Each structure stands twice: as C-alpha cells, then as structure tokens.
Image (cartoon, grey):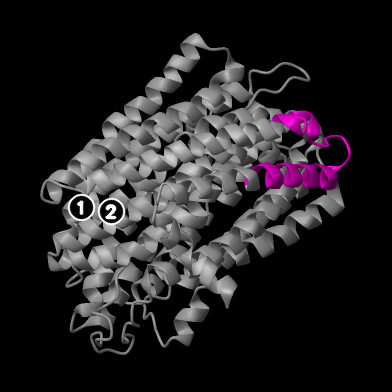
C-alpha cells in the first residue's frame, strides 16, 4: 500500500485566512515527528499482524482460496497506485502546500479534494464492473473455478479503491497541517474491524488446513461474503476515522466542483510523467503477480509451491522495518524538503536528504542482516498459523527480498525530493531500467529455474530493481542539486554499518544454529506455541545481533545512531 507535505507557512507564521485555514503549528523536529508517526505505525502494524495471523488461520498461506483472495485483495492497492496514488502524491501534495499560502486557501483546498474524490469514485465504479477482466489480467494458469472465485472476491474488494483514495486525500491535508499522527494511526481502525470479522469467520467456519483450501466444493457464498466484506469494511473505517481529527481541528471540506485556480495546469506535466512512471512500475508488478500465480498453480496433489499468498506474507514481513522507521523519518523530512525546494534553498534540501539517507541507513542495514539470518523464526512468530510447511515456503522469499531493504528506504526519500521539485520526468525514465531488471529477472527464472523457485527469484529480482533505482536516482539528484550530494559522508556511514551488520549477522547465525535452528521452532503444537518459539528465538538472536551492532557502531563513532535512538532514550529516561 502504498505516501506526504508542507505547512502553509514558515514556523509560527499564520496561514492564509479562510474558513478552513488555520495557522500551521510550529515544526516539532525530525525526532519527535518521526516518533509520533512510528508509534502510530507500530500500533497499526501490530494490529495488522494479528489480522494477518487470523486471515492465514482462516484460509492458509497457500492453496487455491488463499491465492484467489490474495490477488483480489491486492487489486485495489495496485489500481490505486496506477490510477491515483502516484498522481496524488506528486500533484496533490505540492498543490496543497501552495494552496495554504494562497489568499483563497479554502476554495483551492475544497476544489482539489472534490475533483480528486469524484475522479477516484468514477474510476472505482468502472473497475468494479470490470472485475472479471482485471482478475484474468493478473493471473495465469488458473482453472475456471479459481478464476470465478477470484472474480467474486474482486467484486467485493475493488471498491476499497475509493476509500484508499479518500484516506490519502484526508491524510495529505492532515500532514500539510503538521498533524502527522492521525494518518499513521488510522489503520488501527481497519485492524479492529478486520480482527472482528475474521474472528467471526473462524468461530463459524473453523480453520484451514496447513497448506490451505484447494477443494472449492467445500467453499460457499457465506464464506466469500464474510471474508471479502470484512476486508473492505476495514478500509472504509480507516478512511472515515480521519474525519474526526480534521473536524476537531476546525477544518471543513465543502463539496466544490471546478478546476480553475487550483494550480492543476502547472502540475500537468509532473502528473503525466508520474502517471506514466506508476503505470510502468505496476506493469512489472503485474508480471510478477502472473508468474507467482503460475508458480502457485504448478504444485501437484498434496504439494504446494510458493505462490501469490506466500509472496504477500514475505512482503508483509519485509515491509515492517520500512514502514515502522523509514517512512516515519522520510515523511517528517519531506515537509522541510518540500518547503526548501519551493524557496530555492538547495543547501537545505541537500542537508536534509543527507541526514535522511544516513539516519535511515543505520536502521535498514541492520534490518537487512536481521531478516536474512532470522527469516524462519521471524516468520514463525509473525505468521504462526502458516505452520512448518508454510514457513518453509515464506522464509526463502523473505531472505531474497531483504537484500532490497537498504535501497528501498533511500529510493523512497529520493523520490520525494524529485516530487518536491515537481520533476516527474526523471522519475519515469529511471523507472524504465528498474522495471526491465525486475521483468528480466522473472523471465530468467522461468527459463532456468523450476517453478518452486520462481517466487524466491521474484524477491531477488525485486531487490535488484531497487538497487538500480537508487543508483540512477543518486546520479539524477547529484545533477539537480548542484553536482554534489554529501556522498562522502553517506558512503562512509554505509560502509561502517555494513561492517558492523556483517559481524553481527555472523554472531546471530552462530547463535541461531546453537539453539537448534529451524528445529527449535515448535510446529505441530498449536499456533500459540509456534508463535512463542518464534518469539524467543528471534528475540534471543536478534538482541544479540543488535548488541554487537550497536557496540561496533559506537567503536566506529557513528553519530547518526544517537539521532535515531535519541527520542527513544529520552522517553525512557523520563
């Protein structure tokens, strides 16, 4: 799922007057803003893990039903990225920044929100009606029965597209007013609804076999409706809950059609290039989804290969570090970067970008080592209902994905710098080789590897595309920011963290093997014991790795560690 903006004025200054405008609150700093957002994200992710665990218990992490639901429930995310997400982040964010500075701030904000919401609603209605064609586009090798089930799931799930759009629209306004917390806390509402709905499903229909449900004769309409409607109602709650902080803060959104005077003409170029980049990006995702669908359908009776559901579970774990820390830091920094770019302050943009890359790098390098070494126990802890065979399918995919975690954080922050300068053209041309690398890796896997390895190769191809993207964006930003990016300090930081992470990884792997490795995980004794075994193995080895990593960073005098841990340590002291 895809993310944010600037206050209306300098800290402490008043925003433009108007019924819905207000003074932007003073900037609270990177540490505090990041901590607020990280806390909200942590709460939503924790609930999301419970939600996901119950979903896997209901339909499994592999099998016909799990893969059909995974594709259908993934479609609104993919479609939102293609049709709205990219343009909203590239166009709406800068225009909201400008709108709060305008003399007619309320009118401009009203029109921006209304035009965007109406457009997304129309697109949602069209795509819901075309559910059957959309499902066929994203799958390969499926039987007629599985296609029919996926289509019914899609009819219920694609309407999420509108509410994802509404969530993003309202969240952009909150971020522009420096109310960062609600946007990150809103997914908790989704998790509450989902946990209740999936809990009812488990009580009424029971749990799925370890390798999922493959006999569709046992699957009926009440199961389909309860499962898919729960998923959609969760997104509805996530969007509508943002109205509460907006209304309490005095903001009012008046339905006002019209496009004159809201800056869309000047944003037309960046919107077009951004749309093209997102379409190209999602074309790669489409091909990956089709390859995973074919891989999942290639297993024989009683034998399951990793498919879309297994890839999604690995992706969920892989994105946890990114969403908990990286996005929070980058979102807080983007506010200042957007303002500095608008004011022509290149030195400030360069300094904030360097700060973000170094601070994020301290975290993502260690997270890569931890996910690589502890993929199996982390999967057992986070998705205990997957069982031994499901964990064995998910963990190798997670290892392959983890090698793309470091560039993922850097490329996300770099992309927002391009958007701060309203430069969508560069983003598009950089997307071309990265998408080709992803598709090329998938094609190579299909040619040279057996189907059971295709989804693992998909994780590796995704990681490779991330590295290509970050290298190309680095070159582009060096030219944009006057020929330098503080590259020496950024590279030195990553060299030190890589050394520390390598040593900590060796220590963690040795300890993991010492306690029994995969055999230390209590599969077959119920999901509670599985989760507890995954927890103690992950905690024991992870804390040992973290201790070695922090000690080495101290010896190497990595000051960015203090910036990352400062707000947490201050809170603990209080």
The range drawn in magenta is 513-542
**Residue 84, position in %: x, y?**
36, 54
Few, some or many residues within 10 Å of mark 1 (<14, 14–19, 20+): many
Question: What residue lies at 19% left-to-right and 51% top-to-bottom?
Answer: 423
Residue located farthest toward the front when viewing the structure as drawn: 555
Structural distance between the alpha carbons of marks 2 and 1: 24 Å
Q: Is residue 570 left or right of residue 122?
A: right
Examine the image and state in which quarter residue 522 appears: top right
Front-most of residues 455 and 168 = 455
Q: Is residue 281 left or right of residue 153?
A: left
Question: What residue lies at 70% left-to-right and 34% top-to-bottom?
Answer: 512
Q: Is residue 551 above or below residue 315?
A: below
**Residue 259, position in %: x, y?**
22, 68
- Name the residue carrying label 1: 270
Residue located farthest toward the top when viewing the structure as drawn: 448
- The secondary structure that most of the magenta stretch takes on is helix
| The magenta stretch spans residue 75 | no
Front-most of residues 12 and 447 = 12
Q: Quick one: SS at disc 2?
A: helix
Q: Is residue 319 above or below residue 44?
A: above
- Name the residue carrying label 2: 354
Question: What residue lies at 49% left-to-right and 45% top-to-bottom?
Answer: 552
Mark closer to the observer (2, 1): 2
């Amino acid at each position: 799922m895809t993310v944010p903006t600037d206050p209306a004025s300098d800290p402490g200054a008043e925003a433009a007057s108007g019924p819905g405008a207000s003074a932007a609150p003073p900037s609270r700093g990177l540490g505090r803003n990041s901590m607020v957002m990280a806390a909200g994200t942590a709460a939503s992710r924790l609930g999301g893990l419970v939600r996901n665990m119950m979903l896997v218990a209901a339909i499994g992490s592999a099998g016909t039903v799990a893969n059909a639901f995974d594709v259908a429930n993934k479609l609104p995310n993919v479609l939102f990225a293609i049709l709205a997400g990219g343009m909203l982040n590239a166009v709406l964010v800068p225009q909201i920044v400008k709108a709060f500075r305008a003399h007619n701030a309320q009118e401009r904000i009203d029109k921006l929100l209304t035009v965007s919401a109406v457009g997304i609603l129309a697109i949602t209605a069209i795509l819901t009606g075309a559910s059957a064609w959309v499902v066929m586009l994203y799958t390969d090798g499926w039987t007629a029965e599985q296609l029919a089930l996926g289509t019914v799931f899609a009819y219920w799930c694609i309407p999420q597209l509108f509410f994802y759009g509404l969530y993003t629209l309202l969240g952009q306004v909150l971020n522009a007013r420096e109310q960062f917390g609600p946007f990150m806390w809103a997914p908790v509402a989704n998790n509450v609804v989902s946990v209740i709905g999936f809990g009812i499903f488990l009580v009424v229909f029971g749990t799925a076999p370890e390798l999922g449900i493959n006999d569709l004769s046992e699957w009926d309409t009440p199961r389909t409706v309860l499962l898919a409607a729960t998923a959609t109602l969760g997104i509805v709650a996530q969007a509508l809950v943002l109205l509460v902080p907006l209304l309490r803060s005095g903001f009012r959104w008046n339905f006002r059609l019209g496009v004159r005077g809201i800056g869309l003409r000047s944003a037309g170029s960046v919107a077009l290039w951004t749309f093209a980049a997102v379409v190209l990006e999602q074309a790669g995702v489409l091909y990956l989804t089709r390859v995973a669908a074919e891989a999942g359908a290639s297993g024989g009776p009683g034998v399951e290969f990793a498919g879309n559901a297994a890839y999604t579970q690995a992706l969920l774990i892989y994105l946890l570090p990114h969403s908990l820390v990286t996005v929070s830091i980058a979102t807080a920094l983007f506010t200042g970067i957007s303002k500095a770019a608008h004011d022509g302050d290149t030195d400030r943009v360069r300094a904030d970008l360097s700060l973000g890359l170094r601070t994020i790098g301290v975290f993502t390098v260690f997270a890569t080592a931890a996910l690589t070494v502890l993929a199996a126990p982390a999967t057992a802890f986070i998705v205990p209902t997957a069982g031994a065979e499901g964990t064995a399918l998910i963990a190798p995919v997670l290892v392959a994905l983890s090698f793309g975690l470091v560039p993922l954080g850097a490329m996300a922050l770099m992309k927002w710098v391009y958007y701060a300068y309203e430069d969508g053209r560069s983003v598009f041309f950089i997307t071309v080789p990265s998408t080709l690398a992803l598709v090329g890796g998938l094609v190579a896997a299909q040619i040279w590897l057996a189907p059971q390895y295709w989804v693992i190769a998909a994780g590796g191809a995704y990681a490779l595309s991330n590295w290509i993207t970050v290298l190309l964006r680095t070159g582009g930003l060096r030219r944009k920011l006057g020929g330098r990016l503080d590259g020496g300090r950024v590279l030195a930081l990553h060299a030190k963290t890589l050394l520390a992470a390598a040593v900590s990884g060796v220590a963690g792997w040795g300890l993991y093997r010492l306690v029994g490795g995969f055999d230390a995980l209590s599969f077959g004794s119920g999901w509670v014991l599985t989760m507890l075994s995954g927890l103690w193995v992950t905690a024991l080895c992870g804390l040992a790795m973290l201790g070695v990593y922090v000690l080495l960073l101290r010896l190497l005098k990595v000051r960015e560690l203090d910036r990352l841990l400062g707000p947490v340590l201050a809170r603990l002291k209080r």
